[in-house]
Image: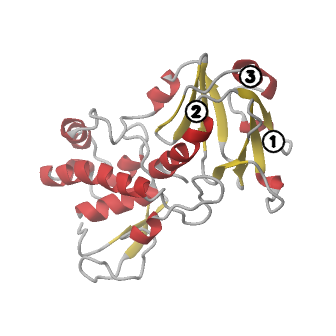
Amino acid sequence: MPELPEVQSVVNYFKPLLLNETIHSVNHLNDYPKVFETHTTSELNKHVSNKKITRIWRRGKYIILNLSNGHLCIHLRMTGQLQVGSSLNDNTKHFTALINLKNKSKIYFKDYRKFGRIYFFKNLDILNYKLGPEPFDPSFNYKYLKNNLNKSRGMIKPKLLNQKFIAGLGNIYVDEVLWKCRVHPITRCDKISAIKIKRLLSAIPEILQKSIDFNGTTIINFSPGNKTKGEFAKYLNIFGKQNQHCSHCKTIIKKIFVSQRGTHFCPKCQKY
């Protein structure tokens, strides 16, 4: 699933293409109306047709298009991609939605697994209720992190994956952060020392920003836009490196499952 850096990379790619443009209409494709989560196609068009896109940004893993009367939101889920136009090389059966702009541009939503969704909200209260602070926001600070970890007896990895605790982190970057901070993924949150909490606070935005700088991580098919690829995979230290040597200590990296998520760690650097 695309995580914060991947979604931000999509926003960065499409911002110059969408900002201040006007939506003509939206359509579901390939007989898949479920792509529109909150409204039918006709209802959605009543809200978005002839509306100018005044801002494109990200909240957690959601792409948000601000309109004068609300917000058109896109969640890529596992395999969703946005694409400008189509070509003869496209397998169009994977297209689930189309955004037509007044300038004749066509933005396709391509989704191999068809889990991605498009929403329209009058306001963002529902998202803000579901999502915790952004990792780059001042509200994500040492006091917030310490207080919330100290109150939790659960494991640190699922805690960091919890979108209501912190928005945007997923499997790749949680593994990378915990390795950098030398925290075992099954460590109880309330057992993490103050110095390691400070490491987490520093490492989370640092690693996310570095990935954004390289347009995110393409593992299988993620694309920031029009079949371009994220280049951060070459800088991953732990994720997907099972049976390879840890670059810190040369110990063999292990893979286990934590809360049913494939989890990579170094047994020496991340002692439990």
Q: Which residue is mark 2?
A: 19
Tell me which corner region of the image, top left, top right, bottom left or bottom right, holds residue 132: top left
Name which residue type carries label 3. Ser
Dot 2: within a 10 Å radius of its alpha carbon, few (fewer than 14), some, or many (20 or more) residues?
some
Q: Amino acid at mark 1?
A: Tyr
Say if 70 sits above or below 72 in the image.
above
Disc number at residue 93? none
Q: How many marks?
A: 3
Residue indicated by mark 3: 49
Q: Where's the N terminus, which quadrant?
A: bottom right
> Of the numbered discs in the image, which one, if any, rests on residue 32?
1
Mark 3: few, some, or many residues within 10 Å (few <14, many ≥20)? some
Viewer-side label of 3, 2: 2
Left or right of 117, for residue 239? left
Left or right: 208 in relation to 11: left
Is residue 36 visible in this depiction of the protein? yes
Mark 3–mark 2 Cα distance, whole angstroms, equals 15 Å
Instruction: Name which residue lies at 61% across and 40% down.
Output: 17
Indicate which disc, 3 or 2, sits on the residue closer to the N terminus: 2
Q: Is residue 160 left or right of residue 74?
A: left
Q: Residue at x 36, y 52 (%)?
A: 209
Q: Residue furthest front?
A: 103
